[in-house]
Image: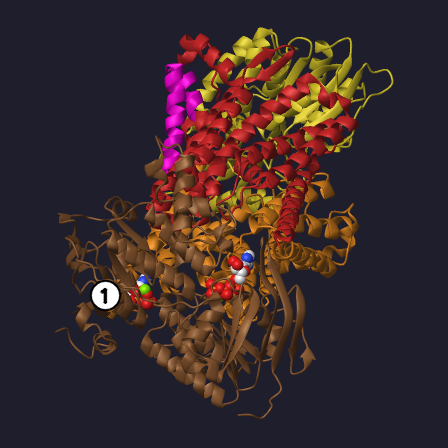
Chain colours: A yellow, B brown, C orange, D red
Amino acid sequence: EGGGSSSKSDAPTFAYVTNGIDPFWDLCAAGVRIAEKEFGVNCEVLMPPKGVVDQKRMMEAMIAKGIDGVAVSPIDADNQTPFLNEVGRNTILITQDADAPKSDRLVYIGTNNYKAGRALGKLVKSAIPEGGEVMIFVGRLEQLNARQRRQGVIDELLGRSMQDLDKVKFDSVDSVNLTSEGSKYVIVDTRTDNFDKAKAKSNAEDSMTKYKNLKCMVGLFAYNPPACIDAIKEANKLGAIKVCGFDEQDALLQAIVEGHAHGTISQQPWEYGYESIKMLKSIYEGKQPENKYFELPFLVVDQSNVESFWAKKKEMAELGKQD
Amino acid sequence: MGEIVPPLIEVSGLTKSFPGVLALRGVSLHLKRGEVLALIGENGAGKSTLMKILAGIQSADAGDFIIDGEQVSFRNVNDAMLKGIALIHQELNLCGNLDLASNVFLGREPTKGGFVNESLMRHQAQQFLSQVGLDMPVNTLAGSLPIGKQQLVEIAKALSCNARVLIMDEPTSSLSQKETDTLFKVVKNLRAHGISIIYISHRLGEVIELADRVTVFRDGENAGDLGRDEINHENMVRLMVGRDLSEFYDRKIHQPGKKVLSLTKFRCPSFPDHPISLSVRAGEIVGIAGLVGAGRTELLQTIFGVTPAIGGVMEIDGKKKEISDPRTAISSGIALVPEDRKQHGLVLPMSVRENSSLPSLKRDSSRGWINESAEEQVTEEAVSALKIKTPNFEQVTRFLSGGNQQKIVLGKWLAMSPKLLMLDEPTRGIDIGAKREIYKLMEKLAGEGMAILFVSSEMEEVLGMADRAYVMHEGKISGELGHNQLSEKAIMNLATGILAAA
Amino acid sequence: MKKNILGIFILLVAIFVITAIINPKFLNAYNMQNLIKWSSLYAVMSLGVAFVIITGGIDLSIGSVVGLVAVVLSICLKLEGMDPWSAIGIALILSLLIGLLHGILITKAKVQPFVVTLCGLLVYRSMGRWFTDNQSIGPMPMEEDAGYKNLEQIQHLDFVFSGKIAIGSFNLPTPAIFLLVLSIAAAIFLRRTIWGRYLFALGSNEDGTRYSGINTDRMKILAYVLCSFFAGMAGILFAFELDSVQPAQTGEFYELYAIAAAVLGGCSLRGGEGSVLGVVIAAAVIRLIYNSINMVGISTHLEFGILGLVILLGVIGDELIKKTVNRKQAVQTS
Amino acid sequence: MKKNILGIFILLVAIFVITAIINPKFLNAYNMQNLIKWSSLYAVMSLGVAFVIITGGIDLSIGSVVGLVAVVLSICLKLEGMDPWSAIGIALILSLLIGLLHGILITKAKVQPFVVTLCGLLVYRSMGRWFTDNQSIGPMPMEEDAGYKNLEQIQHLDFVFSGKIAIGSFNLPTPAIFLLVLSIAAAIFLRRTIWGRYLFALGSNEDGTRYSGINTDRMKILAYVLCSFFAGMAGILFAFELDSVQPAQTGEFYELYAIAAAVLGGCSLRGGEGSVLGVVIAAAVIRLIYNSINMVGISTHLEFGILGLVILLGVIGDELIKKTVNRKQAVQTS
Ligand SMILES: Nc1ncnc2c1ncn2[C@@H]1O[C@H](COP(=O)(O)OP(=O)(O)OP(=O)(O)O)[C@@H](O)[C@H]1O
Ligand SMILES: Nc1ncnc2c1ncn2[C@@H]1O[C@H](COP(=O)(O)OP(=O)(O)OP(=O)(O)O)[C@@H](O)[C@H]1O
Ligand SMILES: [Mg+2]
Ligand SMILES: [Mg+2]
């Protein structure tokens, strides 16, 4: 029979569908595995390699297999809505990590990326209280969460007021030297790298050539902060340029320990996996969620709590390994 | 004759240059209705170039080109076809993946309602193919035929154009005697129907038999014209090379030494059921005669290890040898001058130097380093021994004439001083001067004790050069003829299978 | 030709049967519909590149053309509020122009197809990102979009390009109908018209074909135009199927799928060989592999690897079958 | 040969000068060091593929080989705690074996290079993901890793592969030294040894070369082995340069950069042509374009597009230069 590896044939089977291939998702998978055991269900983790197409065909295959519930991180929520509704008609559908507010998903589990961005902005402020030039590095800006994070950082640094998550107004992707009256900070530029780590590093290097007074680099995707740290280290500017980041790559955590990076915002990915499966199971058992939005707390990691956080992450990474 | 027919084609002052070569320097040529004009000249004289210009494949740099009294300048092949000019190329140009019918009518397919009319096409193709003596299914893939048969398909293709002017650039170079005879009948028949033919050949016998008139080129210029009564061997040779060539096959009989090559029950992959036994002695020139497709090329290639043998014994100098690739063949002292020099003989984009030294490069190297002075020397020797005409050693071989290319192929093997030299159609498409030099060289090498085995479809060549000859027919050796037994009739009988081996 | 198709057909059946045995749910109607749908989408692209491969060329830009056409179509429909059929027209004309550009660069400027289309891959991807500021977009307009006034018509289009037609209890996805029409047209074109013949001839021996009075440049241009046109068709189908276009991602790597399908389906990269049926079956095999991996429950990390191995073994197997058949023929002849 | 390099050299200088004028900071030592470093890394890969292109083949798997080698090296060093130089050895042997496999499949199983290496692209990528469970990994061990005991030695390696050597006030990145050594070796190999000559001969006319007694199969295998070896070297350099390897992403698309550099640098995809210097300059041009785009401040959306256009124009320009030179020669001769 179809379904997960462990063969509890009468237990429900759930699918956890990511938006791509990334170590982040393997940490989420750890949470899925914990929940799988804890709730006695079968789970499949699916990572679409190339975007919307693969996400769609994988979910279709799950429906064909008669899956009992799907937790998905939609890549293009607005436009995927019709298909998500089709999934919703066939099985229990919830969204995680990214929402599709117009769809019939039963609940959305996720971090408030705008808030997280603002928290990152606060980290930047505490890293360079005297102000200065800040540069943002990110893989791609077409993703809503990336834009929300970026906007959170910008708004916080420029002292703008808090925005509502579903009505965030974005600054143009190409805008340079963003600043405001009364703010000590200038966001000089945002550079994208299309997930190419080498590109991410050379972007960081080029920014140091171009902006002599750069004070802080902000990396929005997991691999960005380590790339920035690397580049800074090689330019012998450790300490002179601060790094604040997102997510929890080992190299970043190490740098926080060593004091070369200021801090990071972790979404505690395992919570995504765990809470998603928990939610699916409870809906499967007939309990409707109280709210459409289940906000997962993010964690601000800096030198004070990095050690304990790292230990937890290692444990999770071990658990998340696919066999 | 005697009546004045206005020329159909009149060319004058035509000039054409290629990178590094001035191929035509103001040549002229005229062609009347219903005549066979032979165009002759040494390799690289510019014959093919002029023909390609007439057929719209290349364009002239300067000069007049008049058809039916009208000045023309073709932009492409179609323009030429519309004027009724069809060219049979010197090189084969069939599409290997298409069948014979499609090849014959390529570009002129009969259509019905926008679609190819297959049945009509096949029917007509069959007729043209049988006109040239090719009776095989029209759905055979062209690529599966041997060169000779492909040449016949090319001819059928040209016939199907219903052209007023048919240009044949060395059509017989890969045809057997029988096929050549069929072709001659076709040519004469066409002439009788008022079609004009330009016939290019290095075989002067054919010219004498066919031509109404001869135009001779030398080094891209007109060297003279010969009327019907002036056409003879001496006149043509004199105009081509600018002097008289006496004694053509300058043969001495050598006392053969010990056996260099000996095959017993040797079996080639394409004719597995016909074991072959033969031998060649040191200082002996042995010919292999036969019709196209008789399996001679296959035999030489199998000896050389290109297609490994599937059975039998091969001995070199009395020692058993297993040869599975050309490398082992060469290290056993065998060399092959292949039939298709552009495909197998040369690396065309490389220079004279690089080609000449290719087989000897490894021997002369130390630990893999190229020995440049040895390379230079090898090239020098080949160029001077064979009188290769090249501006310098760095000339790319693609730009040399066929005869000079063939000499380079020979030259590269001389450096290896093989015990056994095999030549497959050594003088195909080669002008009379170069031919003579190659014969002389074969003679000289045999005199020095080299064993020579050559394949030829030219009867004269076998009769003139061979000390001894084997004749092949459909993959088997149908007979062996000693020097005294060699005669045109004996060879033909064995080659056509009329006479079983004695 | 038929031997080529035999090998790939056996492969198709084998994977099909094995998957069905391991997970019988594989056979349910919903899954079959999806399989047919995806196979059709990818087969359309693969057919396009087959034209080019038959002439001995290659087109690496297909994926980017799919992406760009999907982007432009979405902009026209959603943001510009253009008349829907005109938008389709613009998308197709764009793809034709791209093909024309490739053809002209290859035949007139004499740049190698690999280079021209590699540059195309880069440039069209960049254009799509630039046009949209790299934001996701889809063909379906929302209330605030200029295209909202045409919503009904666009939904109609959506049905035409990505709907399902009930045949008894089976819902046939409309892309299958597109594939059917396009592949029959392609087969007739390749096998029954002179131009198809010329494409094969050209791929087999370009000089010989030109010497036969055929305008080989024009035929090559035609092949690239057809290829881009099929990629453009695929772009439209993908846009409506996914309702979502990522300028940086949509179509990425598709050229490799398409070329792999063409090769697996019996096209030789040396030119002169290929069959429509083979390519369609091969495209289906590739989609089937993906589907099987999900149905059987194999780790998605291994997807690429399995696909690569199957393609390799498929091509080697094909070679072996051909050789055996040839040997048999040889034995019979002699 | 020299005409080829002229064109690309002019291109290099032109972009260099223009960028320097627009943003003088471009010229500072730090930026030059980075430019040299990245150019070297990519040039190593490009040199590898040049060997294959010279024989008339192609290698699409380079990017995946870079990724897999970087993954395996990191596993050996960090997780397995292997002796550092042995780990380097294993990484290089792996790359040699991959090349050998390609060569054998191409020459013995007679599968086309495009197909073999396309499958390689898929399979090696999948293997890297599988080995690491798709976790990012890097060569530098941390306290809890088995490799921590070798930390000092590994840091030494890190310096060898991604350090900087002070020459006066200029810090020369070590990858440049690798490139220097490898490119001189490659140039000598191609121009001064018999095997180099054989590769060119083989690329121009395979049959003719075989008929001259050269084991063409072995030479082809050699070319693929060299190509993978250079990709493996690049993999090691990238691993130490980035200190972090993403199994699914590291090296993605690099084959296209490498091939583009080889072609822009004067290698003909028809085989038989190419020069080491040209390829190195072309790789530098590509990195320079990226750097310039950042320095001048052009939107990253346009990067690909600019790169594509420059390659295309570069190749067309090169063609024109060659033609003009040839014509001049013709005139002089006559
Ligand atoms: N495409 C080309 N590029 C450069 N040189 C060429 C080209 N075609 C012909 N040539 C040169 O032009 C000259 C005339 O060649 P052509 O083929 O017309 O001679 P030919 O009389 O037909 O000789 P053959 O009897 O060997 O066929 C030769 O020197 C040849 O090398
Ligand atoms: N590569 C091949 N594949 C299949 N059959 C072949 C191949 N090469 C040759 N043959 C067949 O082997 C037979 C012998 O051909 P071969 O070329 O050896 O004849 P030949 O006597 O040398 O004639 P020619 O005068 O054309 O050189 C022919 O019937 C041909 O069809
Ligand atoms: Mg000629
Ligand atoms: Mg022969």
> Does residue C10 appear anywhere in the picture?
yes
Q: Is residue D244 left or right of residue A107?
A: left
Chain letter behind tag 1: C
Residue under the image location 31 percent in, 54 percent down: B336
Residue at 75%, 26% in the rendered image: D20
Name the foreground residue: B66 vs D129: B66
Which residue is located at x 72 percent, y 34 percent?
Answer: D14
Is B347 displayed left or right of C103 in the figure? Answer: left
Magenta stretch in the rendered image: D72-101
Residue in front for this viewpoint, B431 or B50? B431
Q: Residue B327 placed where, x, y %? A: 29, 45
Residue B317 pos. (x, y %): 16, 49
What residue is shown with label 1? Answer: C331
Q: Is residue C134 above or below residue B79?
A: above
Q: Is residue B379 left or right of residue A174?
A: left
Answer above or below: position of C75 versus D160: below
The kind of residue tagged 1 is Val
The quadrant the N terminus of chain D occupies is top right
Give the farthest residue toward the right: A181
Q: Quick one: SS at disc 1? A: helix
